Image (cartoon, rainbow, N blue to C red):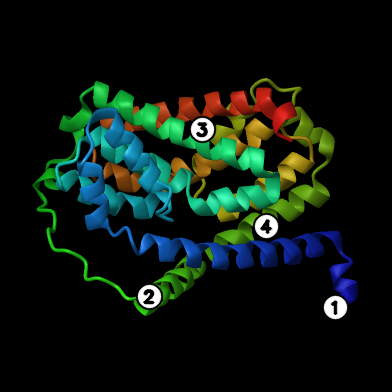
Amino acid sequence: MNKLLENPVLSFFVYDTAKITLLLCLLIFSISYIQSYFPPERSKRIIGRFKGLGARITAALLGTVTPFCSCSSIPLFIGFTSAGLPVGVTFSFLISSPMVDLGSLVLLMSIFGVKVALAYVVFGLIIAVAGSSIIEALHMDRYVEGFVTAVKAAESESPSLTVRDRLIYARDKMTETLRKVFPYIVLGVSIGAVIHNWVPEEVIAKVLGTENPLGVVIATVVGVPMYGDIFGTVPVAEALLVKGARLGTVLAFMMAVTTLSLPSMILLKKVVKTRLLYTFIVICTFGIIAVGYLFNLLQPYLI
């Protein structure tokens, strides 16, 4: 066994898989316990107390305590819209929920440091609020499919939970999430191991480093057709950074994968019309690219 672990690719794979899986279990359990206090009905009521920019900021912040991928955020988007919340508010949640959550904060902190993690979360929230503000200013409500607004939102209250109920909920959510994302962790770590050990540094530096001013754009475009969450993209980002990729470039890649994955866009197309879908994609893409270049400028001060 020790001889096998002397292989750099296998060693990277085993260590990073174990590290990320352990962090995932701890984080999802903790976050799900917190989330048990914020069921959809309560989230709707909280957001509904605010108007305009305050509502969009509140929705973005609530997105940080909901550990959903971009696909699983869409049913909540339907629920919020059917409850009568403005489309800008629901898109603020839809952007922030997969891109920024408490899990990403802690995981990024453990890999890239406190400054990078906090900056990632702040810029992610800015994209969510700014993007949703543009959508609301363009009066895009009419481009939501009619069946969504026709759905009657449930008014029933969630039963109060005991501490034991919340612990069971957190355990079940952790198990469900691990079962769902573990294949992507393995895939992400495998890609990271190959990049870390077999891809020459000069290749990464040439494509995604300072030598290529379009590195952020390339990373964003490459990330869009992929599907995953932050737990699967972190090992890839970590390996790229070690090999010479710029910080903003790898973080733009992570944001694109978690927010604009092709499967989630296909699902979103079922509930919004083409014009709103394209507006959402364009806003998020340009926001991610802008943040990527900003991170590159700030890299000397962050790491």
Q: Estimate the spatial distance between the alpha carbons at disc 1 and disc 2, rounded to whole Å.
A: 42 Å
Question: Where does label 3 land, which residue?
Answer: 123
Question: Where does label 2 land, which residue?
Answer: 163
- Against 69, residue 60 (above or below) is above
Question: Where does label 1 land, which residue?
Answer: 1
Mark 3 against mark 4, which lies toward the viewer? 3
Looking at the picture, which amino acid does disc 3 mark? Answer: Phe
Question: Where does label 4 land, which residue?
Answer: 189
Mark 1 against mark 2, which lies toward the viewer? 2
Q: Estimate the spatial distance between the alpha carbons at disc 4 and disc 1, rounded to whole Å.
A: 20 Å
Residue at the (23%, 37%) spot, across then down: 50
Q: Estimate the spatial distance between the alpha carbons at disc 1 and disc 3, rounded to whole Å.
A: 43 Å
Q: Secondary structure at mark 3?
A: helix
Q: Is residue 140 left or right of 34 when viewed as pictured?
A: left
Q: Is residue 71 left or right of 247 when viewed as pictured?
A: left
The N terminus, quarter of image: bottom right
Q: Estimate the spatial distance between the alpha carbons at disc 3 and disc 2, rounded to whole Å.
A: 34 Å
Query: Residue 118, located in which quarter of the rendered image?
Result: top right
